[in-house]
Amino acid sequence: MKPWRKQAAQPRRGNRPLRSGFVSILGRPNVGKSTLLNQLVGEKVAIVTSKPQTTRTRIHGIVEVPAKKGKHPAAQIVFVDTPGVHRPDSWLDKRMMQEVHDALESRDIVLLMVDATRRQEFSAPESEDSFTLSLVRKLDCPVFLLINKIDLLPKDKLLPMIAELCALRSFAEVIPVSARKGDGLDRLLVKLVEYLPEGERYFPKDQFTDQPLRFMVAELIRERILQETGEEVPYASAVVVERFEEPGPGAKNPVTRISAAIYCERSGQKAILIGKGGSKLKSIGMNARREIESLLGTRVFLELRVIVEEGWRERRGFVESLDWRKQIEELGKREQ
């Protein structure tokens, strides 16, 4: 990860060598951060649901911006999606907020994203909006204000909203967007290139994320759990891929064999995840398998099991073991 920059990057214009840097996306739950990331990258690198706190860790999406003669040079932008900003209660919440703080330390630019359809309460001292704003007040890098979901906002409401938000902090740029429809994203990329420093690529030109396939598979399974269950079950569930066997080279009918464990906190949650006669688990597996096959480009044999791990959200060791970086480290130790 790139070290924190003590000096904020300044806009540079004209045709120059490649520009590159990290752009962290910050905002409350459900403002559209993951939708924005997927639209910018052009691939599904982050799961998206209507439930808050879907994202639990930092997710990198890499975008190559081609040069435009007389307008801007080429750039590689590493976008960092973050969990929704909230006041932490459980150890899982604390770990999620640590991911946010880490993303703010390793950045060249921060995008503060707000939902145009929701009343903003940045001036209320105890509000979640005020808590979110406090995270960017002391940053010495450019902070862009992104007003999302403008397609759902009456046009006469936009300018007063911009004026109200800009009175709270000086933003380098204010850009209204619709992450879902892609409106305003071309302008966003152009402005980001203006502010990024010159540098080398951090990732190969054709790479669009640094996430390992095992983690992306686990997230696709968790996405189905979020979509197919309600109440406390989605938030008390975690997924760990235990086996990931890719087909050998030259296989005529390639099949990827995957086994995954779904963790929950209580036996009642396990019963919901399994469903009557195993119907819910079968539905989760079937729908997740389709997404995984699209990701991997092979047929997939997917085996799921549900394990009760009481109070796992409050246990630091278990929560940290869910980090894919830790999982990769452990796999490396086993293979030595």
Image (tube, rainbow, N blue to C red):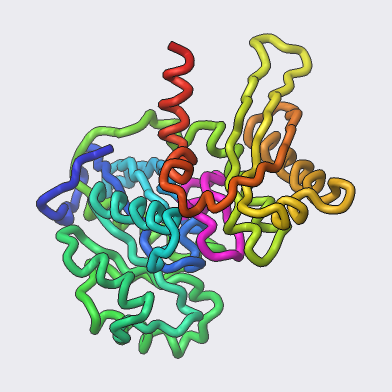
Q: Considering only vertical position in the picture, is 41 above or below 331? A: below
Q: Considering only vertical position in the picture, is 138 above or below 63? A: below
- Which region of the structure is painted magenta? 37-56
> Which sits in the foreground, 334 or 121?
334
Q: Residue furthest right?
A: 277
Residue in the image at 38% along x and 75% along y: 128
Magenta highlight on residue 44 = yes
Q: Is residue 221 visible?
A: no
Magenta highlight on residue 273 = no
So how many labels did they put on this image?
0
Q: Is residue 49 left or right of residue 256?
A: left
Q: Is residue 56 left or right of residue 249?
A: left
Residue in the image at 63% along x and 63% along y: 232
Q: Residue furthest left?
A: 7
Residue in the image at 51% along x and 82% along y: 153
Residue in the image at 55% along x and 32% along y: 213
- x and y, in percent, of residue 172 in the image: 22, 67
> Which sits in the foreground, 316 or 100?
316
- x and y, in percent, of residue 57 in the image: 44, 48
| Quadrant hosting residue 263 | top right
- x and y, in percent, of residue 95 in the image: 39, 52
Q: Considering only vertical position in the picture, is 280 above or below 300? A: below
- x and y, in percent, of residue 66 in the image: 37, 42
Q: Considering only vertical position in the picture, is 322 above or below 147? A: above
In the rendered image, which quarter contains the C terminus?
top left
Q: Is residue 111 visible?
A: yes
| Quadrant hosting residue 234 | bottom right
Q: Main secondary structure of the magenta part?
A: loop
In the rendered image, which quarter contains the N terminus?
top left
| Quadrant hosting residue 269 | bottom right
